[in-house]
Structures are given as C-alpha cells and as structure tokens.
Amino acid sequence: MNEFAPPKSAIRCVYVFIMRRLGFLLSHLSHGKHYVIFESIPDYSGSPKMICLEMEKRGLRHKYAFVWGVDKKQKTSFRDYDCIPFFGKLSFFERIKKNIIEWNAVLIIGNNRCVLKTNERTIRVYTEHGGPLKQCAYFMRQMGPVDYVLSLSDNLSKIDYELFAPDVIKDVGQILIMGHPGNDELFMDAQTSGFWEKILKYRKKTDFNKIIGWFPTFRQRFRNCGDDLSSVFPFGVPILKSKDDLNLLNEYLRKNGVLLLIQIHHIQKKIYSIVDLSNIIVVDQSIKDDCGITNANIMHDIDALITDYSAAYHEFLLLNRPIAITIDDYGDYLEQVGFCFDFFEYIKGFYVKNIEDLKRFIDETANGIDSSHDLRLESLKKIHKYVDGNSTRRVVDFICEKIN
C-alpha cells in the first residue's frame, strides 16, 4: 500500500472498525486533548496551510491541539507545530499515537493523502489540490469518506461530484463552492524569504525584463504507482527534446531579456539532465522548502506561465496574466490518463506544439502582448466563481460554525 491511497474498501472497513475500538479504548491517554489534523503535499502548503493560519489567527489553537500529519521519512519541521508521522512505515507505538490523535480529532483538513476519520464526530474536509483536470476518479474514490469537499465553481462542482460520489461523498450538498484557500496566497504580498536572492545566485533580478515560470505536470512518478507515461522528456519538460533545443531556447531568452524559471513537479521522477543556464533556472521542492515558499509565492512574482495538464493553470488563471499551454504530447496523455472534461473547452490560452510556438510566446511576453487574453476570460468564468482572495475566510467561517 502506498502513501497516496488507503486500504481497499473491504480491508478499510475492518481497519476503521478496529481503529475505532482501539481509539475509544485509548482515548483517555490524550489527557482530554482535542486535535485538528492537517495534511498536505508538499507539507505545510496550499489550502490546509491557509486554513491552519486563519484558525490560529482566530485563537482556535488555544482550544485545540494543531497537528500536521507528515511522512516519517521526511524530517519536516515548520514553525512550532507538532509534526507527527502519519505516513510511511510506522512503528507500533507511532501507529498507536496516530490512532489516538485520529480518534480525538475534531477536524481533519487534507488535500492529498488519506487521513481516515475513525470517530463519527470528527469533521473531515478535503480541499482538493488545484482543481479537477486529470481523469483520476479511481484515486479520488480511494480517499475514504469525507464530510465536505471544496470546489471552485458551479461548473466544476458537477465534475467533482462525478469524481467523488458515491465512495467519498453521498450527496451533492457536501460540495462547498467557496474557492480554494490556497489560491488566496496569489492575492497577498509574496513572502519569498530571500528566494530570488538564492535562486538567482550572482544574477540580479533587474537584469531581466520579464520572468516566465514553467510548471509542467509529472509524467513519471518517483514512487512506483503504476501510472507512468510513455512520453519521456530528457529535460523534465515537454517541447525540449535535445540539447540543441535547450541551448537554442536559452539563447533566445537571453536576446529577449527573459528569465525562464522551471519548477519541476514535486513527484516527478528525476530522470532529466537539465542544468541551470544563463537564462534558465531549475527549481525543485528542496529549494522551495529551504526558502519556505510555495508555488503561489513564485506565481505572484512571475510575468507569465507555461504549463500543460497541470492544475497550476487553474491557479495562475486568477492573476490574469499570459499562459502558454504545451500540448505536444496531448494525444498520449489523453489516451493514457485522460481528462475530467473537454480539455480545449476549459483550458484555453496560447497553445504550444513546438519550439517555434514557444519562441513566439516568449516574444509576446517580452513585448507585453497578451494575445490569448479573451480566451482565458472564457476559462476564468467556467473555472472560478470567486476571484476575491477571500476563500480562506469563507471556509473557516463555515468550519467554525460546524465545530462549535
């Protein structure tokens, strides 16, 4: 069993039954504590992070013990929160501690890995990760029952219901159209903690007229989950198929005064050989962890985005800046993974099929041209109901009402 999915349904029923009994018997060991459990991938990011900070701001940490469920192998530590191993190969005593916390949890907030509720009084909220895009109904239905799922819009709530029912939720009323709190970071002043100074090394940010971020989705997981794609790109991003392509792109960026920041997906298998060049810098999760920043912090400061079949599109769409969408392996992705909806109906922008298209997008960005603006507005209306940066407040208002 991998960390991204709980046991199969029959085993899960037995597992939950045992954990409920064990949790009940050991609940007195919590010394009367009531917990709020948070989980996210990467750790301490996205909507769970924003909900956690807002709940703390409202003084709820004085009433409940805040716990972050993390992977045992990752030595995670942020602020002064208790980071408890919930995933990986746990010892007997670690499992007991996890079970006690789960049983005494008032609230579970997660966006990726499964934290099962073993106490019927616990409220479990699934915040999603970006928004529906890839065809991942099988994975979603392995999440176990939740009380509420956050959604971005009326259109996407219908798709969410198809993905989650009947294994995760039973009723359409369990879908809350409030937006994703994680997206609120896009509307805040970026807290980059020296990120640009570290990432640019001896370069100065002012040396570049524009900065483009490239956020590709994964094609091969670093964990063996049996869903690797046949398309393998030597540098971890689509379009670039040879060293000549890479050097040509770097030179073109240099002539246009544009910096390209490539954000490698946090679960992409590291099979690429790309290195930093004069106008291309590669960022991985370890660099972001070191600087204490998230994807939203980076998006806040870039002028344009390149992506593909990633929910990064949903997020950056809120900033109303140019977006290029690489579709050179669309046929393979459609056949091997698939989408929750008609891709080209929802995901609109500057489509890139080859390196010449990519150069044209760089030209437009360098010269302040946004040729796909009107197309993106169509997508914005379909994908987002709220564009106000207040999703955290809406969600925490709802949560507070429920747990009180």
Image: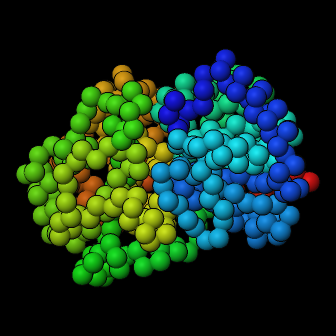
**Displayed quadrant of residue 54:** bottom right
Residue drawn at x 27%, y 55% is 361
Residue drawn at x 19%, y 60% is 275
Q: Depth check: 152 or 194 in front?
A: 194
Q: Residue furthest left?
A: 244
Judge from the rendering whether residue 1 lies leftward or rightward of residue 391; answer left or right. left
Q: Give the image location of residue 274, x and y in percent.
A: 20, 55
Q: Give the image location of residue 297, x and y in percent.
A: 49, 67
Judge from the rendering whether residue 166 lies leftward or rightward of residue 360; answer left or right. right
Q: Residue furthest right?
A: 404
Q: Depth check: 344 or 334 in front?
A: 334
Q: Residue furthest front?
A: 92
Residue drawn at x 52%, y 30% is 1
Residue drawn at x 15%, y 43% is 241
Q: Depth check: 85 or 332 in front?
A: 85
Q: Give the image location of residue 231, x and y in percent.
A: 25, 32
| Above or below: residue 360 compared with residue 2 | below
